Image: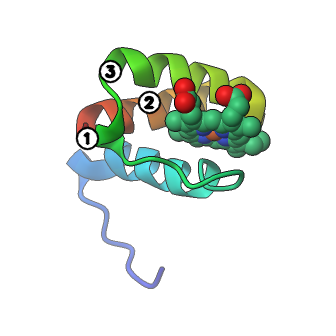
Amino acid sequence: MTSTYQPQTAVMEVGGVQLWANNCIRCHNSPPPNAYNDNEWDAIVNHMQKVGGLTVSDADKIADYLKASN
Ligand code: HEC
């Protein structure tokens, strides 16, 4: 966390991957992005948002990251 360099184009992806790492391994090992397709991730993250008490905004960023990386 010593670097402040943040390429503009990577901000959304970095936000999503950090939120994913921070939130989705609290309760279980989170499967990798390529474990599910876009429709499955939408359903899973929607469910996990409620189970995990995440904000909708954070869940959206996590879903964007997972669907961009599968
Ligand atoms: C508060 C604890 C908690 C958090 C936080 C959490 N999960 Fe889960 N997750 C569970 C539990 C409990 C289950 C199994 C029961 C269920 O599906 O409700 C589960 C199941 C799953 C499954 C299996 C679903 C299936 O259909 O087989 C996946 C994939 C998953 N979680 C991904 C995630 C992702 C991605 C996040 C972050 C957005 C996340 N989880 C955050 C508790 C959590």
Identify the residue shown where x is 52% and y is 56%.
21
Residue 54 is situated, as x and y percent measured from the top left of the image, at 70, 34
Task: Provide the residue designation for mark 1.
Answer: 69
Q: Earlier in the sequence, mark 1 or mark 3?
A: 3
Identify the residue shown where x is 31% and y is 62%.
6
The amino acid beneath tag 3 is Asp
Residue 47 is situated, as x and y percent measured from the top left of the image, at 64, 21
Relative side of 48 to 45, left or right:
right
Distance of label 2 from label 3 (alpha carbons) = 8 Å
Per the image, label 1 sits on a secondary structure element best described as helix
The amino acid beneath tag 1 is Ser
Of all residues shown, which one is farthest toward the bottom?
Answer: 2
Distance of label 1 from label 3 (alpha carbons) = 10 Å
Q: Choose between 58 and 2: the one closer to the eye.
A: 58
Residue 62 visible to an observer of this rendering: yes
Distance of label 2 from label 1 (alpha carbons) = 10 Å
Identify the residue shown where x is 52% and y is 49%.
30
Q: Earlier in the sequence, mark 2 or mark 1?
A: 2
Quadrant in which the C terminus appears: top left
Task: Provide the residue designation for mark 3.
Answer: 38
Task: Provide the residue designation for mark 2.
Answer: 63
Q: Nearer the viewer, mark 2 or mark 3?
A: 3
Relative side of 50 to 24, left or right:
right
The amino acid beneath tag 2 is Ala
Per the image, label 3 sits on a secondary structure element best described as helix
